[in-house]
Image (tube, rainbow, N blue to C red):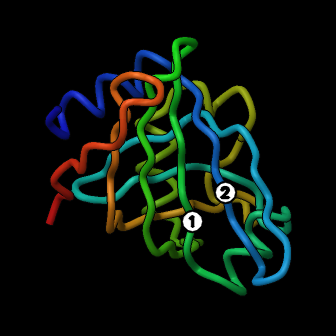
Amino acid sequence: MSLEMVKSFMKEVGWGFLATSDGNKVGVRPMGSCVWMGNELWAATSDGTEKITQLRKVPYAEYCFSDREGKHVRIAGPCTISTNNGDKLKLYEAVPILKNYIKNPTTPEYVVIRMKPERIRLMAQAGKGYEDIEVPK
């Protein structure tokens, strides 16, 4: 599978799960509105949430996007939290549904998680092992 097929699969399943840790406890939560911006995976969230607190302590995370049959893609890498209004506006315009939740993209509560993937793995069929997908450079 190519990266383009991974992106297509992500769109098809819609929601993924984001795992973060503060070094002691792990948190996993559903995440929508993830979009590729060049070679990074971006997602919108609110400042002050558990995931942001954890990412500030341990700036590394993993997404998992799965279908009902167990086919899934795992994407892991270091993350930064952007409060840059240019980044926030770019994501806001790329993901129209954000307008239902964020009225003003420059509000300080809205932040962008920017992941630079180091590893992308696909399990095309449940229990059949992982295939490494080439990471964008």
Question: Which amino acid, mark 2?
Answer: Ala
> Does residue 80 lie above or below 51 as drawn?
below
> Does residue 49 lie above or below 68 as drawn?
below
Q: Are marks 1 and 2 in contact (CB under 8 Å)?
A: yes
Quarter of image, res 8: top left
Observer-nearest residue: 2 or 123? Answer: 123
User: Which element is circle 2 on?
Assistant: strand
Quarter of image, res 99: top right
Q: Is residue 77 left or right of residue 113?
A: left
- At a point 42% along the width and 15% down the height, the residue shown is 12
- At a point 76% along the width and 63% down the height, the residue shown is 51
Question: Which amino acid, mark 1?
Answer: Ala
The picture places residue 23, in percent across and down from the top left corner, at 76, 84
Picture quarter with the N terminus: top left
User: Which element is circle 1 on?
Assistant: strand
Q: Is residue 63 left or right of residue 100?
A: left
Write down the residue under mark 1. 61
- At a point 77% along the width and 65% down the height, the residue shown is 47
Observer-nearest residue: 78 or 131? Answer: 131
Observer-nearest residue: 127 or 49? Answer: 127
- At a point 15% along the width and 53% down the height, the residue shown is 134
